[in-house]
Image (cartoon, helix red, strand yellow):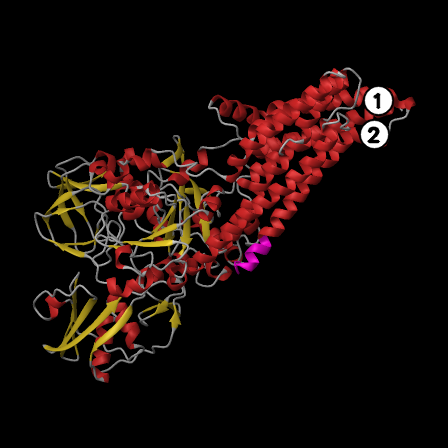
Amino acid sequence: MTIIYFLIGCSLLLAVCFLGAFFWAQRSGQNDDLHTPAMRMLLEDDEEEKPLEK
Amino acid sequence: MIQSAPIEKTLCYHCGDECLTGEYIAEDKQFCCQGCKSVYEILSTNKLCSYYRYNEHPGATQVRADKRFDYLSEPSIISELIDYTDEKITIVTFYIPHIHCSSCLWLLEQLNKINPAIHNCRVDFLKKQLNIRFDHHKISLQQLVELLSDIGYEPLISLHDIIKKQNSATKDNLVSKIAVAGFCFGNVMLLSFPEYLGITAFEQSFKFFFGMLNILFCLPVVFYSGRGYFISAWQNLRNKVLNIDFPLALGIAVLFIRTVTEVLSRSGAGFADTLCGLVFFLLVGKFVQKKTYHHISFERDYRSFFPVAVHILENEVEKPIPLSQLLIHHRMVIRHNEIIPADAILLKGDALVDFSFVTGESVPVNKTLGEIIYAGGRQMGEAIELEVVKPVSQSYLTQLWNNEAFTRKQDNRMQTFNEKVSKYFTIVLLLIAFSSLFFWLSADYRRGLAAFTAVLIVACPCALALSTPFTMSAALSIFDRNLFYLKNTAVVEQLARINTIVMDKTGTITTGDSANVKVEVLLTEDQKQLVYSACINSTHPLCRMIYHYLGSKKRIPVSSYTEIPGKGILAIINNNRLRIGSASLVLGHAEQDAHATKVHIAINEIYLGYFAFTHHYREGMEKISALEPSLNLHLLSGDQDHERVELVKFFKDTTRMHFNQSPQDKLNFIQTLQDDGDKVMMIGDGLNDSGALKQSDLGIAVTDNVNNFSPGSDAILDGKSFDKLPAFLRFSKDTVRIIHFSFLISLTYNLVGLSYAVTGNLSPLTAAILMPLSTVTIISFTSIATHVAAKKRKLL
């Protein structure tokens, strides 16, 4: 049963990684604007004019 | 001879307004004006016409486009506006009120296709902001703003706008605190489960290990996430106030100490999960309460209304200077549609000033040379020259802001229910805790301590602390859906306690443009056609109302047309000479009838009659005046009393109606009402009401477009929802009732818990179940009850 010590250690490490990832996202402003990216992805990038140029 | 342009309803391809002429056509698309057409042309030459694919008519109407941006070449102004600059690039953020659909987003992020000197554009849709990174060697800030303005997205530039400040300030790390608390809560739950399920004697060694880990997790929860509660409790204690944070901090501290001692002395499992859960839920409650409207500012003062710069004449040369550098004796030049920023004497030109900002009076006023013109007026005629007689901050209008109402701290104008209750709650809680301690002390001091701490744990007012934020945020989102935007959750409770309503007239209970037309003129069909053809050339609101009133007619080409600002139109059509406009233009003498605004008509020097325009009141005024027995209604207007007769039906009593009120008078009036003990709600719209809005217990700004400027206030109401005001009032009362009821529920939970606690036999499991259970009950009860109440008031 001592394996539990190791397993808990692993699970904690993983959880801390996730927490760290969240903090990083928060610091780098990824959560500042949650609305615009959702709209942006529905817009097409360069259409029509690209074929003309090539 | 007669050209018949087809006058069926064609909508402008760009902005969706009705095309009144067939003049503006580009690539077989119709436009309402030259502005819209040129925007289309810019976009089409840059192959950006997908703009029109995402939404129909995404543009803003370009009818009035006479802005000057040359002040943006002043280095002192530039440096205030930009976020960052170095040798190569400059970054600037603009607030663009017109951002409203995906087309806007698409176009604004493609600006580099129009001008390659723009490196990168990012739109923040909810905040309506555009962040631009550009090469300032290739395009100046002024050119950039002109480009934006050309494509129909004119940024709103104001050095004092709060919106920018909101971005930088108030970055408390609440989200991080919640993340830490949530992380620890999850892990502690995991580690506590074995204890609840029963650990066999064989596995006893794990127990201590789990306990130690739990303590480890509690440390960041108490000392990082929960720190705010200790600080707040201590500050309040020093100010001799018992607020809800005190029992909460006490609960957190007791939970932590007892957990540590139990684990270290190996006498029990401790309350680590209750502790983490408590802090987590409390912080979530705080988060929910903090709803912010990014695109609305509640804190505007006169500076956001005034221009950033003003043109002054120095040695006969015109140059722009920032408003802050405007001094007495400066000669300033004010053009059409610009605001006069300081009290000044008129030196040159025809002044026709619209004071609707300041007084609420909608009809522009003529001023003669040498007269003092007060700040805040908007010049409607030609360019004028003025000499400044008072600095900006000392002007007639702006000195209102020196009043004490503006220096006073805004919050806590009324004690909330929570604040009132928590005082008694804390006292009773401490009484029970100490009496159970002393009760057991004589028999068994261990049991006494156990009972004492258990009481403080179980009675920790978590559910109580959550009931207000969750109810209020649910209420706020319902108000929001009905176009009523509150500054914060405390405003809901203030709304429930109002017993007096004071209203401004112009713009508040009268709508901006739709007036009732009274026709005192007999026109033949031919004459109607002539008048229609003349009026359609003008953008003046009264002319627009006339041709809308006359309906679709054939348009006859005009051979000569002159519009005299503030007076009217002179036109020659089919050899008929038309005079349309004020009495002084048409009749040759000024008239003194203040009851209505009139437009006189004469054809071939024969006077035919006039169109009279009276104001139109907002829908729902009857409903509001029906509130009368329970609420006192007052009218406070800066206007003359021409409408006294029409308004008396809403206000019952002429003594309740006050006309000719200056901004300062309005403020004083509110103060006298408050001195009589009334809780006053002020509803206003203009800068002239801002003193009263600030002084009142609850200031509501009414606006027909929430992106427009509205004065500082506690709430902003969209004009479309004006008739729902009585429903809002009733709903706010319901909300307060819901809070009272959820308080009872949480008290019941506390009592159940207490009955265990006073005996000293509180098991960690009971606490761990009771706390989340009560929280979930409160959250679901408040949100369901708020919903039901909203349905009942027809707000959903």
At horizontal 28% and vertical 41% (from top left) the residue drawn is B308
Q: For marks 2 and 1, give the CA distance.
A: 9 Å
B295 horizontally vs B787: left or right: left
- Give amino acid for label 2: Pro
Q: Work out whether residue B292 or residue A21 is closer to the camera in this orientation and state it.
A: B292
Q: Which mark is residue B241?
A: none
Mark 2–mark 1 CB contact (< 8 Å): yes
Q: Residues within 10 Å of mark 1 (few under 14, many from 20)?
A: some
Q: Work out whether residue B58 or residue B227 is closer to the camera in this orientation and state it.
A: B227
Q: Does the rendering let one see residue A35?
A: no
- Give amino acid for label 1: Phe
* Residue B415 picture location, percent across and down: 46, 37
Q: Can you identify the residue that label 2 sits on?
A: B194
Residue B723 belongs to magenta span: no
Please give the count of numbered marks on the rendered protein.
Answer: 2
Q: Can you identify the residue that label 1 sits on?
A: B206
Quadrant position of residue B269: top right
Q: Residues within 10 Å of mark 2 (few under 14, many from 20)?
A: some
B213 horizontally vs B693: left or right: right
Give the quadrant of the C terminus of chain B.
Answer: bottom right
Q: Chain of mark 2?
A: B
Quadrant position of residue B452: top right
* Residue B696 picture location, percent across and down: 35, 44
The residues colored magenta run B787-795
Q: Secondary structure at mark 2?
A: helix
Q: Is residue B412 above or below residue B577?
A: above
Residue B790 belongs to magenta span: yes
Q: Work out whether residue A7 or residue B769 is closer to the camera in this orientation and state it.
A: B769
Q: Secondary structure at mark 1?
A: helix
